[in-house]
Image (spheres, helix red, strand yellow):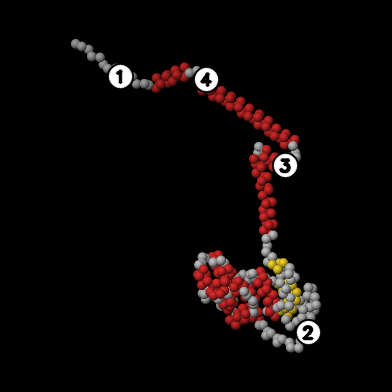
Amino acid sequence: MSTSSKPEYPQPVTKADVKAAKAAYQASRPWYKKKRYLFPLALVVLIAILGHNGGGSDKGTTTASEQTSSSPSSTPTDTSSESANSGVSTKVTQKAQPKAKKASKVQTASKVQTYTMPNEVGKDLQAAQDDLQGVVGHFFVSHSKDATGQDRFQVLDRDWQVCDQSVPSGRGFSENTAVTFTVVRTSESCPATSAAPVTKAVAPKPKAKPKPAAPAVTTAQEQAIGSAQDYLSFQAFSRNGLIEQLSSDAGEGFSRADAVYAVDHIRVNYRMQAAKSAKDYLKIEHFSRSGLIEQLESDAGDGYTHAQAVYGVNAVGL
């Protein structure tokens, strides 16, 4: 009877076998490949490199400081270019910038437009103010004072005549110049020297045919004139728009007669007012040329005449 042999199967590898093989491999490596020798050696090399670089940096710093102290006559530009610290050059550049800004402000201030002062002596105060606005090209605020020294208030400018002006005729002035007219009533004569106001009133010279006395201005009319001037100082109005503002209940509430009287007794360039209104509209809304003209001349808009509305639109370049 024959005996059959059993097949042999590979034995499984245990954890003990893996550890033994790994220990045998580590023991067979040369010393310079072992971590306990490699890490300390790398640390020693790194310390040597850092020590060498630190010594060279100190030497370079000492040399640079000696060169700086030995050459005091070098300019700030050379020092900033040779310095190893780039922050020094940046600070020098930033300090130089304000000088350039100051120079630009001086150049801007020198570009203020100047105008030639016309001769207004002998004209009524309203005409003198209109002449100044015509020269400047827009609303210009001038001042007036009583030549007699009584400090009378000039309610109706056309009832006062100019005796002297603070800016002589032919001399230049700008929008920042304070122009003052010294005036007396049209029924009076100018003092002999209007530059220095006298303390006593100058008696008017008798005339063969004295002008009829102007009707007395009521308190309501005087207040309406002041209100109209106040409105025009910060907002543009057409003639109809200003009358409506003064007489409406939502406005000042003056009687329509007083409102009309006030508007008729102040001199206003309504074409310039239309140009200002057109400019204000374009700041808050977009318009076509025809649409802006219609807005300026319509009763629901500003109430300018067609010619005034066209002038205003042309002035803003539309």
Looking at the picture, which amino acid does disc 4 mark? Tyr
Residue 240 spot, x, y in % from top left: 57, 77
Residue 17 spot, x, y in % from top left: 39, 19
Mark 3, residue position: 75
User: How many neighbours does mark 2 have within 10 angstroms: few (below 14), some (14-19), or many (20 or more)?
Assistant: few
Q: Earlier in the sequence, mark 4 or mark 3?
A: 4
Picture quadrant where residue 110 is located = bottom right
Label 2, label 1: how far apart the Cα atoms are: 150 Å
The quadrant the N terminus occupies is top left
Residue situated furthest bottom in the rendering? 208
**Res 205 label:** 2
Task: Say which element carries label 1.
Answer: loop
Mark 4, residue position: 32
Task: Say which element carries label 2.
Answer: loop
Mark 1, residue position: 9
Question: How many numbered circles does the render carry?
Answer: 4
Label 3, label 2: how far apart the Cα atoms are: 78 Å
Judge from the rendering whether residue 206 lies leftward or rightward of residue 312; answer left or right. Answer: right
User: How many neighbours does mark 4 have within 10 angstroms: few (below 14), some (14-19), or many (20 or more)?
Assistant: few
Q: Earlier in the sequence, mark 2 or mark 1?
A: 1
Looking at the picture, which amino acid does disc 3 mark? Thr
Above/below status of 94 relative to 248? above
